[in-house]
Image (cartoon, rainbow, N blue to C red):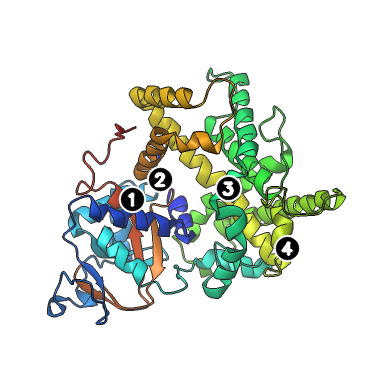
Amino acid sequence: MALSPNRVLTLLLTRRGQTCCQSQSSLTSSVRRSTTVAQPVDKGDDRPKLIKESEVKPFEAIPGQQSKLATYINVFRNGGLARLDKYFTWRRKHLRSCWKESIGVVSGVVVADPSATEAVVRAEGKYPRRLPMEPWLLYRKMGGYSLGVFLAEGEDWQRHRSVLLKPLLRPKEVASHTDTLNEVSDDLIAKIRRVPATTGKSSSTMDDELARWSMEGMAAILFNRRLGLLSDSVDPLSEEFIKASKDFFTYSEALFFLPLKLQVKLNLPAWKNVRQAAKSIFDITEFHIKESITARKRSSDESNIDDDGHIRHIIPYMNDSGKLTDGEILASTAELFGAAVDTTSSTMVWILDLLAWNRNVQEKLHEEITGVVKKGDKITQEHLKHLHYLKAVIRESMRLYAVAPFFTRILASDVILGGYHVPAGTTVIVHVGLMSRDPQFFDNPDKFIQKGG
């Protein structure tokens, strides 16, 4: 399975990249430090400088500049748009860990070094700025949709995040959904056992079932209701949502590699299909929001908080916060709901694939799980505390196949990256995927190796 460019560009928008880069920065404490030097240009910074100011090269000296035609020729020589990972690996081989890049609407300086990543994060300011994705912003504007937590910037992003922080990001709140997610996972296992494994006897694939599993779990958390996606007969509305989510990302690919003005003016298929898919995503999400609110009103207990102090009605909670408009609640919910179809399910596909090809790891993992979770028991947070090998397997899987292989930041201040002066306002593309497969930091970096427990 290749890493598709639509997923790559989609995930440039997420804040997940910040966590990834912090993880990569920590590599410098345990592995050989890269030769690339990266320090903020700040004379008040008392940290030791690894490069003299007189040795810093100008921005214009950063290598890698090439014409659009040369870029596309080199992209297709390395496997085409579906294999941008190979193109970036090729560029890294020739240009080391800091270079100029321009692919489609994405232009900036690429860095693939933990020290440089640290400098970028330190220079991002109070409100991290990402490369604006003009096609998605335009369809929101034309369709009259608000921006949610994935597309909002600055204080608006912080406002969205402050509302979503407690119900979705705090560990205790996440743990409160364990029982519900256990039920969803049990349904997935039961579905797999019912569906014939022989090729040709079922139109459903593992990718399909994992997408339904992921969407079912997110629906249970966001809307406090089950959709029945893992039953033998699936609701057509839910299937439409999954198709719309996949279509949205698939057709977005062309929007990022062809002139947007031309596509909009001629109403080319990619632009038309993205707008149609987006409308379906918003319409179906709005339907579930209304169902969730109606169900809450029918309940005799209208409190959003359960007896243990956990938030059990997330949509009403967002509404009662008073910080978000109805349109913003719809936007953030649609983004969260839609992301569940792609990011969680694709991560699980890779984990299962790697386990299938590494029988020894699979057996050791099975041994740990059966030793911690006794037969017939439901998995609890207490069990998860002792599943160390499981966590290591997941980390190794995500090292090889990161959900967000790279992310963007628009610098809020000047920095030195790789010995070059990079001014404020420059877009920096931090390539986590290249660092995760760098032999400087990992022995046999392209292999799935899991020895620890």
Q: Is residue 147 above or below residue 250?
A: below
Which quarter of the image is occupied by the C terminus?
A: top left
Read off the residue under disc 4: 319
Read off the residue under disc 2: 3
Question: Mark 4 against mark 3, which lies toward the viewer?
Answer: 3
Label of residue 174 in the image? 3
Label of residue 14 in the image? none
* Residue furthest front in the image: 308
Q: Earlier in the sequence, mark 4 or mark 3?
A: 3
Q: Whole-percent x and y of residue 451?
A: 29, 31
Q: Nearer the viewer, residue 191 or 121?
A: 121
For disc 3, the neighbor class at 10 Å (few under 14, some 14 to 19, many from 20) is some
Which amino acid type is shown beneath numbered disc 4? Answer: Asn
Which amino acid type is shown beneath numbered disc 2? Answer: Leu
| Circle 2 SS class | loop
Q: Is residue 329 above or below residue 24?
A: below
In the image, 237: left or right of 99?
right
Mark 1–mark 2 Cα distance, whole angstroms, equals 11 Å
Read off the residue under disc 1: 433
Mark 3–mark 1 Cα distance, whole angstroms, equals 27 Å
- Do the CB atoms of the residues marked 1 and 2 lie less than 8 Å apart? yes
Mark 3–mark 2 Cα distance, whole angstroms, equals 29 Å
| Circle 1 SS class | helix
| Circle 3 SS class | helix
Residue pictured at 36% horizontal, 66% vertical: 121
Which amino acid type is shown beneath numbered disc 3? Answer: Val
Question: Mark 3 against mark 1, which lies toward the viewer?
Answer: 3
